[in-house]
Amino acid sequence: MTNETIISLFTALGITESTPSHALAQLAATDSKYLRDLKLNVLSTLQSKHLTPKEAYIIALSVAINQQCAP
């Protein structure tokens, strides 16, 4: 994996280097602004002073579950 945005996002989330999903790989291939915004939004949410770590992780889990249930 060579996309710096994906690598830094995975590192911030504590994910060891792995193969990104097909959608994530397509975003990386086009150097999408969405991918950079996603990284900033995720990191901002996880580091928010207004949310406890538990609340931030629950939001992240909810987003992941919602994404998997999308038609």
Image: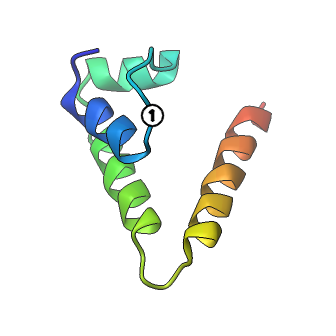
Residue drawn 32% across the image and 32% down it: 6
Q: Position of residue 11 (x, y in %)?
A: 33, 39
> Residue 21, relative to residue 11: is it above or below?
above
Q: According to the image, label 1 marks what residue?
A: 15
Between residue 18 and residue 45, name the one nearer to us: 18
Element type at mark 1: loop
Q: Position of residue 23 (x, y in %)?
A: 49, 22
Q: Is residue 62 left or right of residue 38?
A: right
Quarter of the figure with the C terminus: top right
Q: Quadrant of residue 64?
A: top right
> Residue 26, relative to residue 11: is it above or below?
above
Could you classify mark 1 by the number of other residues whose Cα lies within 10 Å: few (under 14), some (14-19), or many (20 or more)? few
> Residue 64, relative to residue 56: is it above or below?
above
Q: Residue furthest bottom?
A: 50
The image shows a total of numbered marks equal to 1
Between residue 71 and residue 42, name the one nearer to us: 42
Q: Give the color scheme: rainbow, by chain, secondary structure or one colour.
A: rainbow
Is any part of residue 13 visible from this angle?
A: yes
Residue drawn 51% across the image and 19% down it: 21
Quarter of the figure with the N terminus: top left
Q: Position of residue 43 (x, y in %)?
A: 37, 58
Q: Quadrant of residue 52?
A: bottom right
Of the residues shown, which amino acid type is indicated by label 1? Answer: Ile
Is any part of residue 32 visible from this angle?
A: no
Residue drawn 26% across the image and 41% down it: 33
